[in-house]
Amino acid sequence: MIRFENVSKVYDPNIIGLEDVNIHIERGEFCFLVGHSGSGKSTFIRLLLKEFEPTEGTITVAGRNLQRMRRSALPYHRRNLGCVFQDFKLLPNKTVADNVAYALRVTGQPVRAIRRKVPEILNLVGLGDKMNNLPDELSAGEQQRVSVARAFVNHPSLLIADEPTGNLDPDTSVGIMQLLYRINRTGTTVLMATHDREMVDKMRKRVIALEDGKVIRDEDKGLYR
């Protein structure tokens, strides 16, 4: 699903984002990306989204070489990745249902399909009774569930979660992790960047640790440490 081959990213003037990274993540894996601030996690994710180009190396996502991708194909690439962020990024003046439906509209889904899929996905994340609420009428955990629903409604092959529990209390964080685990069980590859040591240690999934732009550890069923 994800292949980084000798990937480096250098920002001017000579600030290293990533250095000679080689990572292969298979379809259906659940993988944590860990490291302190400035370790390279954000650079890794922004390269996947093709917000940046690598200085060296090759990046392949779902069999597509990102460097060879035409600019016209970029929106399609990003729409086929589900993304969940720490700050939710919901449309404040749109209802829960409209926030989720937006992800379907931009891919050209017909109205009939949108009317069917939105309630299905909101029931999946436990918000079937909140469809007509605005984001500010929800708790932080509920807002993150809307964000997860929006990211997953198109059933992407890869879901990228960037600190999705960073603004949540421990109990709410557990619920979000359980939801991401259920999504992973459907066959979706999940890559989660996090500082949450306790959650990583509980899950015992693959852990890729970055430090100063380098991979310093890559372990199946790993701990944060």
Image (spheres, helix red, strand yellow):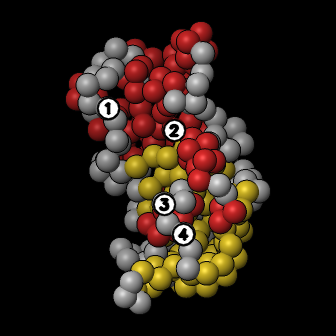
Residue closer to the observer: 36 or 151: 151
Which element is circle 2 on? Answer: helix
Q: Earlier in the sequence, mark 4 or mark 2?
A: 4
Which callout, 1 or 2, points to the residue nearer the camera?
Answer: 1
Neighbor class of circle 4 (other Cα within 10 Å; few <14, some 14-19, many 20+) is some
What percent of the width, then of the height, locates residue 7?
62, 78
In the foreground, 217 or 37: 37
Q: Which residue is mark 4?
A: 53
Nearer to us: label 2 or label 3: 3
Q: Residues within 10 Å of mark 1 (few under 14, many from 20)?
A: some
Q: Residue furthest bottom?
A: 14
Quadrant placement of the N terminus:
bottom right
Local crowd size for mark 3, using a 10 Å CA cut-off: few (<14), some (14–19), many (≥20): few
Disc 4 secondary structure class = loop
Q: Circle 3 sits on which residue?
A: 51
| Residue that numbered label 1 is attached to | 91
Name the mark nearer the viewer: 3 or 1: 3
Q: Quadrant of residue 115?
A: top right
Secondary structure beneath dot 1 equals loop
Cβ–Cβ under 8 Å for marks 4 and 3: no
Residues at circles 3 and 1 in contact by the CB criterion of under 8 Å: no
Query: Where is residue 89 shown, x and y percent of the image?
Result: 34, 41
Rounded to the nearest angstrom, the CA distance separating label 3 from label 1 is: 22 Å
Reading the image, the residue beneath label 2 is 151
Query: Which of pointers 1 and 2 lies earlier in the amino acid sequence?
Result: 1
